[in-house]
Image (cartoon, coloured by chain):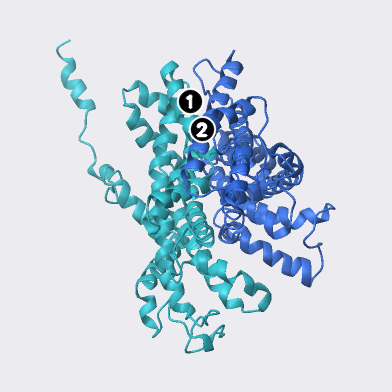
Chain colours: A cyan, B blue
């Protein structure tokens, strides 16, 4: 059979180079994050959310300096003035300029909202992730899940107000104490939600596949499970922020939060409650509007982020 | 066997909560008779303290309390001299639970509906509209919403009765004020979760075999999208059926929500402990039921290695 070789050779012909051209990768290969950024930029709502959020943050920095009033400067003869070219957002009952107070308050409210949301995120994901992943994984796994969930129950159970007052006794009142007070029990909600998601997700085949390929538990949680529940995490985050802003106003109302005359959106809304009957609508309207706009911005941007980070959605 | 073990764990958890609360409330400065202290002579104050065992060492007070608690006696209320904590809770729980359950049903039904509509119309008008409603719901807290409802629906338009408690009509406004926030959060969860579920192959299968949209949504979509909603509802259920401070104050509802806050400011120790234990019991049982509900909604879920 030695003569078969040339015959076989005849079967192999040089390929037509034109075939390769349409197999060429037409766009540059993108990393996960480059791809995510591209998808966000293409998403109109996400861009609107991002621009709005940037505007709010920039105004919280420069806003108070755009008017010749300070947030605490009182002028009793100018109480409850409606909007005018002097007072863009009107004045409150003590004649303080609402514009200056809104942007000074933005700093406090945004810091409290974002900081406590981030702390909730880190602790909540860690506890919820480990708990949900270990549940049903042998006797030790069950024990870890049960132990972490009992901690969550205890933190849900003990009166939150008592914890806050205790903290105020131990530490001095202020922004940091307030953030700690909100985070100490705040993360349990995130932990329960993350645990529920993990319980459901980890039954899927890709987790089994990763496990059989020898991926470590930590890597499975971080690389395989969390990206698949980003949407729910982002939604949870976006409502943690306003909840923290309002919790701060409730605590301030009880005398446990930021001290007057320092403004925050929550305290401004709270102070304005009486104006629902008196008709000084701008006192309630602007703090409520700012909180709503911030929420809109976070939600719109969050939705875009969720679409962009979702490994399954292509374009 | 599993149930017995779980029951035992629940009692231990409750005991830890009661102990921590006991320690914290005695650690913060203050005294239930602080407002009387200026007017009454020292001997009377001492008699009053003795009546509530407050003159004994803390450890003894703690064991006396646990002994009563074991017999389900939550002790006397220092503020309300005539009624004990068991009576306070028994009297106020009805209105609080009614409002809580009503508002929760409202939030669940409307929230899921809104979320599904938004997900089915992803990035179209109805999606944006539902997101708008959700943002309003999350951004306007009950302490602002409630006075607005009273002003317009109660006083100006006279649709619902204001500030008393009696007929079912009285429960509509407070229920709505209580429901709006959770409604918005549930809607957001369902929308996000539905969008994720709709990427799954079994939805494509269901659609490909010609099932109606309704059938795909109800039988294949919602069921798998419900896990975050269930996780969220558990603690919420315990919180709303034991009443809410703000709503009960604004609408003058004779519930138990006010005791959770007032008792702490009055340092009414037995009421602090009693309400905490009552709430925690409901919470712990609810969270247990939630774990069972996960399996009901998604039978693939396995929480313990024995498969329960």
Q: Quadrant of residue B4?
A: top right
Q: Residue at x 52, y 81 (%)?
A: A91
Circle 2 packing at 10 Å, graded few (<14), some (14-19), many (20+), is some
Q: Residue furthest top?
A: A1
- Tell me if I can see residue B119 in this picture: no
**Residue where numbered disc 2 is placed:** B19
- The quadrant of the picture occupied by the N terminus of chain B is top right
Disc 1 packing (10 Å; few <14; some 14–19; many ≥20):
many
B270 on left or right of A196: right
Q: Nearer the viewer, residue A231 or A159?
A: A159
Residue A308 drawn at (x, y percent):
41, 50
Q: Is residue B106 left or right of residue B288?
A: right
For disc 2, the chain is B
Q: Nearer the viewer, mark 2 or mark 1?
A: 2
Q: Which residue does the image show at 67% across and 53% down from the upper left?
A: B178
**Residue B90 makes an appearance in the image:** yes
- How many numbered marks are there? 2
Q: Of helix, strand and loop, which one carries label 2?
A: helix
Q: Residue at x 39, y 73 (%)?
A: A59
Percent position of residue A259, x then y: 44, 65
Name which quarter of the figure residue A125 lies in. Answer: top left
Q: Do marks 2 and 1 share a chain?
A: no
- Residue A43's spot in the image, x, y percent? 44, 59
Camera-nearest residue between A33 and B228: B228
Q: Which residue is outermost to the right?
A: B167
Q: Nearer the viewer, residue A125 or B86?
A: B86
Residue bearing mark 1: A146
């Amino acid at each position: 059979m030695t003569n078969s070789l040339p015959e076989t050779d005849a079967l192999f012909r040089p390929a037509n180079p034109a075939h390769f051209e349409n197999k060429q990768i037409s766009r540059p290969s993108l990393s996960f994050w480059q791809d995510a950024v591209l998808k966000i930029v293409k998403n109109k709502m996400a861009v609107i959310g991002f621009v709005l959020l940037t505007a709010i943050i920039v105004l919280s920095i420069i806003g108070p300096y755009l008017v010749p009033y300070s947030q605490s400067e009182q002028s009793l003869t100018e109480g409850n003035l409606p909007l005018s070219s002097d007072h863009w957002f009107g004045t409150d009952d003590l004649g303080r300029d609402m514009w200056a107070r809104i942007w000074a308050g933005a700093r406090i409210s945004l810091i409290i909202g974002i900081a406590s949301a981030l702390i909730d995120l880190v602790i909540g994901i860690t506890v919820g992730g480990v708990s949900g992943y270990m549940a049903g994984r042998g006797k030790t796994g069950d024990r870890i899940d049960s132990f972490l969930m009992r901690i969550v129950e205890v933190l849900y159970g003990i009166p939150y107000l008592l914890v806050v007052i205790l903290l105020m006794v131990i530490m001095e009142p202020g922004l940091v104490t307030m953030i700690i007070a909100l985070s100490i029990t705040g993360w349990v909600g995130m932990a329960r939600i993350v645990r529920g998601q993990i319980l459901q997700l980890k039954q899927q085949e890709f987790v089994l596949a990763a496990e059989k390929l020898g991926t470590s538990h930590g890597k499975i949680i971080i690389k395989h499970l969390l990206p698949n529940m980003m949407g729910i995490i982002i939604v949870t985050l976006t409502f943690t922020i306003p909840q923290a802003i309002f919790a701060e106003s409730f605590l301030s109302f009880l005398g446990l939060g930021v001290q007057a005359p320092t403004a925050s959106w929550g305290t401004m809304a709270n102070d304005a409650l009486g104006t629902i009957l008196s008709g000084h609508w701008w006192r309630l309207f602007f703090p409520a509007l700012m909180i709503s706009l911030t929420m809109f911005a976070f939600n719109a941007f969050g939705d875009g982020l969720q679409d962009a980070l979702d490994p399954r959605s292509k374009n | 066997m599993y149930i017995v073990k779980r029951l035992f764990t629940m009692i231990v958890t409750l005991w830890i909560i009661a102990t921590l609360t006991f320690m914290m409330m005695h650690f913060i400065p203050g005294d239930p008779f602080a407002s009387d202290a200026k007017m009454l002579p020292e001997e009377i104050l001492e008699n009053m303290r003795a009546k509530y065992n407050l003159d004994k060492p803390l450890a003894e007070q703690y064991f006396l309390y646990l002994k009563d608690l074991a017999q389900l006696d939550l002790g006397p209320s220092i503020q309300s001299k005539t009624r004990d904590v068991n009576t306070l809770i028994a009297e106020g729980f009805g209105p609080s639970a009614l409002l809580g359950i009503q508002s929760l049903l409202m939030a669940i039904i409307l929230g899921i509906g809104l979320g599904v509509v938004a997900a089915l119309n992803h990035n179209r008008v109805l999606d944006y509209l539902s997101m708008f409603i959700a943002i309003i719901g999350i951004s306007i807290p009950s302490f602002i919403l409630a006075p607005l409802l009273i002003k317009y629906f109660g006083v100006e338009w006279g649709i619902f009765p204001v500030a008393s408690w009696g007929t079912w009509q009285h429960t509509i406004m407070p229920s709505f004020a209580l429901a709006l926030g959770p409604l918005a959060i549930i809607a957001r969860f369902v929308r996000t979760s539905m969008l994720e579920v709709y990427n799954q192959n079994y939805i494509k299968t269901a659609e490909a075999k010609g099932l109606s949209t309704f059938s795909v949504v109800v039988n294949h979509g919602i069921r798998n999208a419900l896990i975050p909603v269930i996780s969220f509802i558990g603690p919420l259920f315990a919180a709303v059926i034991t009443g809410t401070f703000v709503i009960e104050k604004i609408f003058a509802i004779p519930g138990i929500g006010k005791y959770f806050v007032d008792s702490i400011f009055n340092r009414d120790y037995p009421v602090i402990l009693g309400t905490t234990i009552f709430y925690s019991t409901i919470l712990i049982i609810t969270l247990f039921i939630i774990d069972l509900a996960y399996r009901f909604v998604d039978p693939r879920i396995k929480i313990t290695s024995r498969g329960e």
